Amino acid sequence: MTPPTNDEAQVVGLLLAAGGGRRLGGRPKALLTHRGRPLVEYAVRMLREGGCTGVHVVLGAAADEVRARARLEGCVLVENPEWAEGMGSSLRVGLASLGGTHAGAALVSLVDQPGIGAEAIGRVRAAYRSPASLAAAAYDGRRGHPVLLGADRWQPVAASAHGDQGARAYLAEHEREITLVECGDVAEPYDIDTEADLGRLG
């Protein structure tokens, strides 16, 4: 097999940060405070420290406020005007934004999972082999995030991403092709979804 070129070997972080926090009283998740700064900043830093060569951030709810308050220098900011439709629309917009990067893969991460840090991201990133790669973090054997999508997968993933399902349908259909990377020893895949979850933020 021909070794990947420098461009093809790049894994770009794709952070989905458009949610409006409906169960949090309409507080956009990107702007929740974690360690003194907006949560979206922390998520971007984890992707960078995990080895992603660039980061694309999909914004939606309160996008202008996120741009104003969060330090996202060096990121490609992509706005999803249809963010209220669910994660599927944000994934489609995010993958479309990668079209001109010539990267070999996207590492898809969610802004509301601060328990997944750079070490887990780095492990999944290291599963990249080719633009056909498909990998995901696992927690005690159960698939979770982040998910690595080789560039050859972007178009079919986008075509299957609807509602709040993201890549779930595609991953279920191609389950036997997924390389699972155990991360349960270094990360916790909880979501910040409700008021009760806010206690997990620092």
Image (tube, rainbow, N blue to C red):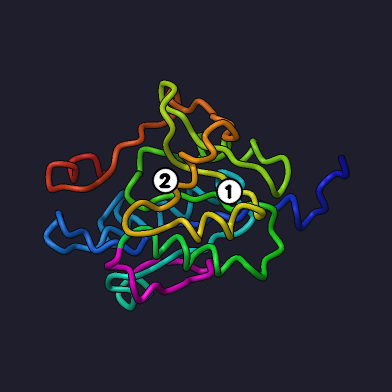
From the top left corner, tell me how far across and down residue 199 is, in percent.
Answer: 18, 41
Vertical comparison of 23 with 125: above or below? below
Vertical comparison of 146 with 72: above or below? above
- Say which residue appears at 35% left-offset and 44% top-offset: 114
Q: Residues within 10 Å of mark 1 (few under 14, many from 20)?
A: many
Report the span colored magenta.
Answer: 69-85
Q: Nearer the viewer, mark 1 or mark 2?
A: 2
Q: Quadrant of residue 81?
A: bottom left
Amino acid under label 2?
Arg
From the top left corner, tell me how far across and down residue 176 is, in percent.
Answer: 56, 31
Vertical comparison of 145 with 107: above or below? above
Q: Are marks 1 and 2 in contact (CB under 8 Å)?
A: no
Q: Quadrant of residue 122?
A: top right
From the top left corner, tell me how far across and down residue 102 is, in percent.
Answer: 71, 63
Q: Residue furthest right?
A: 2
- Left or right: residue 194 versus residue 97 is left
Amino acid under label 1?
Leu
Q: Secondary structure at mark 1?
A: strand
Q: CA distance from mark 1 to mark 2?
A: 12 Å
User: Does 70 lie within the magenta span?
Assistant: yes
Q: Quadrant of the C terminus?
A: top left
Q: Nearer the viewer, residue 136 or 196?
A: 136
Q: Earlier in the sequence, mark 1 or mark 2?
A: 1
User: Does 113 lie within the magenta span?
Assistant: no
Q: Which mark is residue 51?
A: none
- Left or right: residue 138 versus residue 99 is left
Q: Which mark is residue 149?
A: 1
- Say which residue appears at 45% left-offset and 60% top-offset: 91
Which residue is the site of mark 2?
168
Q: Residues within 10 Å of mark 2 (few under 14, many from 20)?
A: some
